[in-house]
Amino acid sequence: MHIISAIGMKHIRNFCIIAHIDHGKSTLADRLLELTRTLSERDMENQVLDDMDLEKEKGITIKSHAIQMLYPYKGETYKLNLIDTPGHVDFSYEVSRSIASCEGALLVVDASQGIQAQTISNLYQAIDHNLEIIPVLNKIDMESAQIDVVTDQIVDLIGCDPDDIFKISARTGEGVAPILDAIVERIPAPQGNPDAPLQALIFDSVFNSFRGIIAYFKVKNGSIRKGDNVKFFNTGMEYVADEVGVLKMKLIPTGEVACGDVGYIISGIKNATEVKVGDTITHTDAPCSEAIAGFEEVKPMVFAGMYPVQADKFEELRTTLEKFQLNDASFVYEPESSLALGSGFRCGFLGLLHLEIVQERLFREFDMDVITTVPNVSYKVYTSQGEVMDVHNPSGLPAPTLIEHIEEPYIRAQIISKSEFFGPIMKLCLDKRGTLISQHYITADRVELNYDMPLSEIVFDFYDKLKSISKGYASFDYHMTGFRPAKLVKLDILLNGEPADALSTLIHEDNAYDFGRKMCVKLKDLIPRQQFDIPIQAAIGAKIIARETVKQVRKDVTAKCYGGDVTRKRKLLEKQKEGKKRMRQIGTVQVPQSAFMAVLKLDS
């Protein structure tokens, strides 16, 4: 314990690993932990930092993790803090926090796939924060590795010397050891004043049911000790530091976290809203004058309703979402109600993968089963009274007569692909109302395309389609560019004449007819048959644009009238018809959860 606290600031190195999804980031982290003997061989397993079952199953990193390694170099002990980052575009928010807490980054590129869009966008973020970049070429042991080609790509991208690039295989461990020396030599020690008032940036928080909220932070100035009175700068809440320490595979209490170091604080906080990721911790009696800057608020891109399967579980869902928000600061929610589904929450997500992960984690970690409505994006509605409204949900749209115009969010999409898929990718982007901004060849057979596209068009299935037409070779990254006017209409789905508000969508005028027809056909297969005919209609305002009918289940009432007069049969059928009519007036139509999910996969 004394060794850990005795290591001075000039012997600390804070770094993160930047890479596209599946380029071997977690495997490289495993090798570094092995080489520094942070873990005994008995505790070692693959993707050891990915502690969620979901991360191991999908082979992706969802949350950023921090871990400390001690590394002897030239007779001195160095403290290396690795803050692991996710690679998927939906979790780029986690990456921005890790980058804000580091002085250097390992840029990992797959030798068989080359540079991908996500790598470039995270790299630019790291360069903006003046991080020292160490380029690493991974998977050189694979038969499909193109070492010389990808080396040239890295040199073009960051302008380094070809000899500066580490060529490794994280799976076998070949060439990994020199990276540790490079981390010590090339990455600068953290800058800060140990005697200044305490300033520490919170980059993550987790919820522990026994100890409350545990916040992870990096100390920029000053130091923090056990028993100190601290306050969170932006929320203004004050606490006592019950325990502070460093992050190894487990939390290790040290009594003090010094300037430049990364650690955790437990102060018995029970309420989720009191800890804001990106907030600054300071002392109560001698506070710092300003919060640490360089941290952006998260912007949800996709909105969907979440409702409890049983209506009486509403309060339980509220508590679950509060706890969940602690483990995932990029998730936002607010209460809303729906005619079809009762009370629930409108939730904001970073993308469709994020939505899927949240749904799965709620079920696994909190045993909470939820119904998710059709995802959509947030629109700006300009009314004829001169007001501007933010609408996240089609049911929140004012009457058509009050709307002057609607603006939808636009993104700048960056797609990198092999040039043989150039044609199909351009067609896909044009179908999604994209406008080509620029194209250029990175190498002879790799092309980069930049498009302006409406966010609503990529929310559903754009990424899946892009992957399938490019045989998995295209990579995709995007960022918001602002709002533009659009011709949008509200498409309602009527079941038995009643609008099902959970199925209504805001859609571009040109696609409305096609989408409405597909919806009706799909729902016809999914809605169970009743004793009466159920008309399924797609409508824009009062105009019906498509219709399908779920046929009634017929009971043969005339079976007992064999022989005899035909009027007897007719009389029975008329009587049955009256009954069906009455039943249809009071009958309700149950929409199964599969119907809501099927709408997302309409084209498949």
Image (cartoon, rainbow, N blue to C red):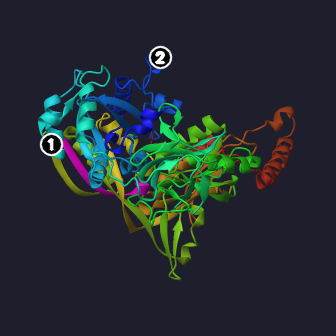
* Residue located beneath label 1 in the image: 160
* Distance from the alpha carbon under mark 1 to that under mark 2: 39 Å
Q: Which residue is at 15% across, 42% downward? A: 160
- What amino acid type is highlighted by mark number 1? Cys
Q: Is residue 142 left or right of residue 28?
A: left
Q: Which residue is at 45% across, 21% downward? A: 45
Q: Which residue is at 52% across, 45% downward? A: 355
Q: Earlier in the sequence, mark 1 or mark 2?
A: 2
Q: Is residue 95 magenta?
A: no
Label 1: which secondary element = loop
Quarter of the image holding residue 540? bottom right
- What amino acid type is highlighted by mark number 2? Arg
Q: Is residue 523 visible?
A: no
Q: Is residue 604 left or right of residue 541?
A: left
Q: Is residue 154 above or below residue 287?
A: above
- Which residue is most to the bottom? 385
Q: Is residue 452 magenta?
A: yes
Q: Is residue 316 left or right of residue 111?
A: right
Quarter of the image holding residue 289? bottom left
Q: Main secondary structure of the magenta part?
A: strand
Image x and y of residue 521, in percent: 55, 45
**Number of the front mark, 1 or 2:** 2
Specify the segment rendered in magenta: 446-457
Q: Is residue 46 above or below residue 322?
A: above
Image x and y of residue 3, in percent: 42, 33
* Residue located beneath label 2 in the image: 42
